[in-house]
Amino acid sequence: MSTPLQTTEPRPDRAAGDVVFAVEHVTLRFGGVTSLNDVSLNMYRGEILAVIGPNGAGKTSLFNSLTGVYTPQEGSIELSGRAGDAPVSVLGKKTHIINHLGVARTFQNIRLFPALTALENVQVGIESRQKSGPLSAMLGLPWQRREQRESTASAYQLLDDVGLANRANELAGSLPYGEQRRLEIARALGTDPGVLLLDEPAAGTNPAEKRDLAQLIQGVNTERNISVLLIEHDMKLVMSIAHRIIVLNFGGKIAEGSPAEIQRNPAVVAAYLGTSVEEAAGAAEQQAEVKLISTGSGATALGRGDADHPSPHRSGTDGSHAG
Ligand SMILES: Nc1ncnc2c1ncn2[C@@H]1O[C@H](COP(=O)(O)OP(=O)(O)O)[C@@H](O)[C@H]1O
Ligand SMILES: [Mg+2]
């Protein structure tokens, strides 16, 4: 028996025009594989919106489409990155342009500069929005030196905010996994985003790190007023911090609603969870505890294997990627 999960009621302001991402009928194909199939969704300013679904469901493809890594063959994606920004299409725009428009992200497979210090990694994020180019840096112009000092101070502050102040001068590659994940968030925050996309930020972290992460994400949302789009397998984490949840399966959106609605949605239970969300979260917690004692290795909350190894559940269903 598991205890009922706490859920958060929807908080976002859905006033007209307060849409961060408006995704309409997006289809993305790779050869015969349809990774997104006619997906429509809105992300509202101020919300923590979670995207869940089995491995291979299209979650990362959605992130990559929102950030200019992939350009879908069909549909439209409009972005208003910061409050008051007029919506613009992201299709065909380069990733750094979309970052300048207020979208920052972390990656399912951590992408830090391992041979730079934690501080330097965050400075890279901050300096991506400063005016200094390599030439002014070389010449050491006064305003360039001022920007440098400011970026160092801001980077320290961000490290402190994510609980890594004491790691500032350590190489990113030498940090424990959970700290690397937090460092990636600090670097993303350095670009001063209006919206933050987190791709499986809790993957491979232990229960204590997951609790810290939940707090960090909520702080980013409420204290910095940053909208958060969260891909995450850990149901306990998702149910405790998400205002709304969207469920993908085989590239299509199969459900959307509050955590409470998703937990009792029969299509979600059948397609994704195979059991109730509460049971899945409870089982995952027990599993994580067992793993900590036995091997110390991380497990995804629903026991669906890691991202690089699609779930065996998949082969049992008759869905097909071919479109
Ligand atoms: N660059 C790519 N080339 C070919 N297939 C891809 C590519 N990116 C994603 N896919 C396919 O799209 C589907 C969805 O993948 P992905 O978005 O990574 O799912 P998820 O993040 O939900 O696990 C998978 O079948 C995957 O193999
Ligand atoms: Mg993924």
Image (spheres, grey):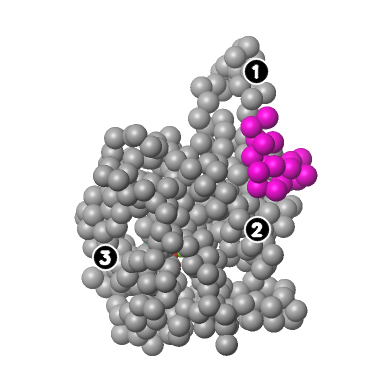
According to the picture, the residue beneath numbered tag 1 turns out to be 145
Residue at image coords 67%, 23%: 149
Between 244 and 194, the residue placed more toward the observer is 244
Labelled disc at residue 37:
3
According to the picture, the residue beneath numbered tag 2 turns out to be 212
Q: On the picture, is 160 further left or further right than 307?
A: right
- Regarding residue 170, the answer to whether it shows in the image is no
- Regarding residue 241, the answer to whether it shows in the image is yes
Determine which quarter of the picture holds residue 124. top right
Give the answer, above or below, for where 189 lies relative to 310. above
User: How much space separates mark 1 and mark 3, taking CA atoms?
Assistant: 49 Å
Q: What element carries label 3?
A: strand
Tell me which amino acid carries mark 1. Answer: Arg
Tell me which amino acid carries mark 2. Answer: Asp
At which x and y percent is residue 11?
Answer: 42, 54
Whether 280 is among the magenta residues is: no
